[in-house]
Amino acid sequence: MASSVRNQSHRLALLLHLANGGRLMHNDRKQFFVLALAFLMSMFFRSYFGVVGPMVAADIDLDPSRYGYAASAFFISFGLLQMPLGSAFDRFGARTPVTVSMIVGSMGAALVAMAGTAGQLAAGQAVLGAGCAPIFMGVVYQFGSLGDGVAARKKIAAISAVGSLGALLSASPMVWLSETLGWRGAMLVAASAMALCAAGVALRMGPPPQEGQSEDAPESRAAGIVYLLPICLTLSLGGTFRNAWATPYLSGVFSADQRVSGFALTIVSAVGMGTSFAIPALVSRVSPRSIVTAGMAAATIAAFAMAVSPGSSIVAAIALICLLYSIGNLHPLVMAEAQEIAPSKHRGLLLGFLNTVVFFGVAISSAIFGWIAQIAGGPSATFQIILFSTAGCLAIGLTVYLTRPAWRSVANQR
């Protein structure tokens, strides 16, 4: 009798455990879904101004300098808030800062929609940038706490892949919506979507898992972050080259017209998106360190080879741009590695610092490429120097990355 009661108790406990596990898995899927949508909105707003900007400039009579200020206001506030928001993660967790920031971001999008002057537009852009600032870092912080490092990196990379669709939505779909509703109406729709995503994050994003965290993580392990700084600076080179210098390269060196350049950039975007979706599948089969190493090595070799003769082949040039642009998709893997070696109480702050370094990389590379273009003698010489510089920077970043200590994650130590 007692044995039967014990057996039934064990079966009941097992059923409760399985049911609870099912609820956790269901909630985890919902959390993944809302965070993926949140990051999609962040990527959308990072790219949308390239489509809406000319319409805005025509509507409120922006000169080129004010147009530039408005475009940069988003990224200035985005970059400046990385470390303060990371510190807020350490104190409050990710859900509250991400939710509040996204609500603020939806207000920023609405301000852009109602802007009547250059100052109002820049203010709206700055508020919108603040709203998008914590989203990717929040994804890394949230899933980086998982005890299984491979599962964490796979989820972070998968969300990054889904988020890349936001850049796609900011192109032709945004053009269509702006033509249908006007650019102001389209921005109000985008603001509403941001607010809905904020509500989803508030309702479905839970506290970070505890199994991958340890308050006893040695502070000395944070020194490993130093080895990731050069690679964080160089991961942005491909995006900088694609967004600002790919068309001048193709037109200046190969005399490509706008149609050819546009088709080439479409190929580059498609390859970049395909790479972003391939990485999560690779993570479960190949070590993330091997993926980062292979991608950086391939980009370095290709950049050196193309720098020797930058005008040898337009097909080779497009392939190189594809490769350089695709290494930006390694960013989630590097950030996931960073959070594994960061002490728990400073994890958000260190992630914010690394994200700030990435933005510094964009600013520095843009300035240097512009300076090279100004002093070099002609397109061929310009891009030869740019490509050699790019290859050298990639080589330095990869070398430092490979010489870092083999830190083990907290989860693996436990």
Image (cartoon, helix red, strand yellow):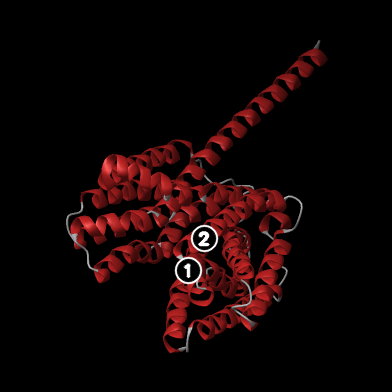
Q: Determine whether label 2 and label 1 are within 8 Å by CB.
A: yes
Looking at the image, can residue 254 be seen?
yes
The x and y percentages for residue 164 are 52, 51
The x and y percentages for residue 379 are 49, 81
> Mark 1 Cα within 10 Å, few/some/many (few <14, many 20+)?
many
* Disc assigned to residue 396: none
Q: Residue at x 19, y 61 (%)?
A: 61
**Split into 4 quadrants, where in the image is the C terminus?**
bottom right
The x and y percentages for residue 360 are 45, 73
Circle 2 sits in a helix, a strand or a loop, which is it? helix
Q: Is residue 211 left or right of residue 284?
A: left
The x and y percentages for residue 220 are 62, 71
Circle 1 sits in a helix, a strand or a loop, which is it? helix
The amino acid type, in three-letter code, at marker 1 is Thr
* Disc assigned to residue 265: 2
Which residue is situated farthest in the left direction here?
116
Q: Nearer the viewer, residue 206 or 266?
A: 266
Q: Is residue 411 left or right of residue 187?
A: right
Q: In the displayed structure, would residue 244 be above or below residue 192?
A: below
* Disc assigned to residue 247: 1
Which residue is situated farthest in the top direction here?
1
Q: Is residue 385 left or right of residue 179?
A: right
